[in-house]
Structure formats: structure tokens, C-alpha cells
Amino acid sequence: MFLLRLIRDGGPVMWIILICSIISLFVFLMKVFQFHREEINVRELLRGLFNVLKREGLVEAITLCDHTPGPAAKLLGAAIVAYQRGDEDIRAAIDEAALEEIPKLERHLNILSTLGFVMPLIGLFGTVIGMIKAFEAVRVSLSSTAIAGAVTMALISTAAALAVAIPCYIGYNYLLSRVNTITLDMEKAALEITAFFERRRKNNPENK
């Protein structure tokens, strides 16, 4: 009932703010669940892959990467496939896989950043509408109740917009930090698997 009363007192702009808040919450939860599903121990995965690759289990290593969630596993799988094919530049295969995986991590984050920026402007728009109504009430000499209602609408819309914008900014920065962490894990995994194959080719020239 309190929420309905705020929407009623805040005017039509409150419906826009409500819709934006639902969208931002949906995007945030969707990305949190995505990162949770794809969160793995990259160090443990590398250890398992190196043990398999040392006994020439390339197919087993590729299968392990295919059944492991997360972009780091996709990069490692691309590197192993490139090594199996005999490609000289394994890093190129890794970079190509990264070009596919990184946009998936960053997808929809721009929605949160955009809403965090736009919501105060929407609140300001509601404030302007409320002040226009207040001045109109004064001009036509309406009761103080009408004037107070218009001012209340202006204040509620501003407060509601800020209440949505602040969590949007916080959520966006949190998700961006998760993306940076995952990207760093991907880079470390790529460097280690590349160094591993370079050592193998150096020690076993027939594998080149």
C-alpha cells in the first residue's frame, strides 16, 4: 500500500521509474547468476590440464575444457585445439576465442550504467512537472492542499529516481569488477598454457 501511495502521489513519472527499477534489478540478478555459474578455480583447471597433456591426452584435455564452464576454459580449449592442429601461433587462437567470450561478460552492463546516468534526469523531469503544477495552483489561487500535493509530487519523483540510480551505479561497478577479475584469470590462463606448449615444442621438436 505504501508503494502504491508513493506512485500515486509521485505522478506519472513514477511509473517510468518503477519500470526502470525492475529492468535494472533483472539485469543485475541475471549477471550475478551468470558469473556465479561461470566462476571456476582456474588454477585447479590448469593443473588438471597439464597432468593430462603431459601424457599426450589432447582429446581428454579438450573434453575437459568443453565440460568446464567459464570463458577461461573456452580459451584453454582453443589453445589446445590450435596445438593439436599444429598451428604455430597458438596465441592467435586464444585471442580469437577471447573476442567471442569477453563481449558475453560485458553484455547488458551498459543498461545499468545508462539507467544510473538517466534516472536522476527522469527524477528532475518529475520535479519540473511538480513545480509547474505548484505554480499553476498558486496562479489560479487553489487551496494550499493542492499546492502541497504538487510539491510532494516533485520531491517524491526526485527521491525515487535517486533511490534507483544509486544502486544502479553500485551494481554496475560491482559487476564491472567481476568482469575485470574474470578477464585477468583468462589472461593468466592464456599465458600459462602458451608457455606450457612452447616448452613442449622446445623439448620435443618433432611436435612442431
Image (cartoon, rainbow, N blue to C red):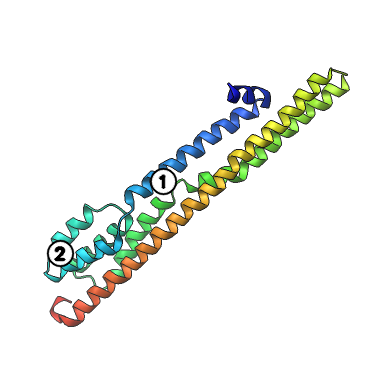
Left or right, 185 with respect to 66, comes to right
Q: Earlier in the sequence, mark 1 or mark 2?
A: 1
Left or right, 193 with respect to 133, comes to left
SS type, badge 1: helix
Q: Do the numbered discs 1 and 2 sit on residues whose CB atoms are within 8 Å?
A: no
Q: Residue at x 30, y 55 (%)?
A: 40
Type of residue at label 1?
Answer: Val
Is residue 7 shown above or below 184? above
Q: Which image quadrant for residue 55?
A: bottom left
* Residue 58 numbered tag: 2
Quarter holding the N terminus is top right
Left or right, 205 with respect to 107, comes to left
Between disc 1 and disc 2, the foreground one is 1
Type of residue at label 2?
Answer: Leu
Is residue 168 shown above or below 176? above
- Residue beneath label 1, please? 32
SS type, badge 2: helix
Q: Residue at x 28, y 52 (%)?
A: 69
Q: Residue at x 43, y 41 (%)?
A: 29
Is residue 119 shown above or below 59? above
> How many numbered tags mark residues here?
2
Mark 1–mark 2 Cα distance, whole angstroms, equals 33 Å
Q: Which image quadrant for residue 65?
A: bottom left
Query: Where does the image place residue 5, in percent across and percent down from the top left?
Result: 63, 22
Q: Residues within 10 Å of mark 1 (few under 14, many from 20)?
A: some
Query: Where does the image place residue 91, in percent across and percent down from the top left?
Result: 31, 69
Query: Where does the image place residue 188, in percent across and percent down from the top left?
Result: 35, 68
Query: Where does the image place residue 37, in percent across and percent down from the top left?
Result: 32, 47
Q: Residue at x 36, y 63 (%)?
A: 185
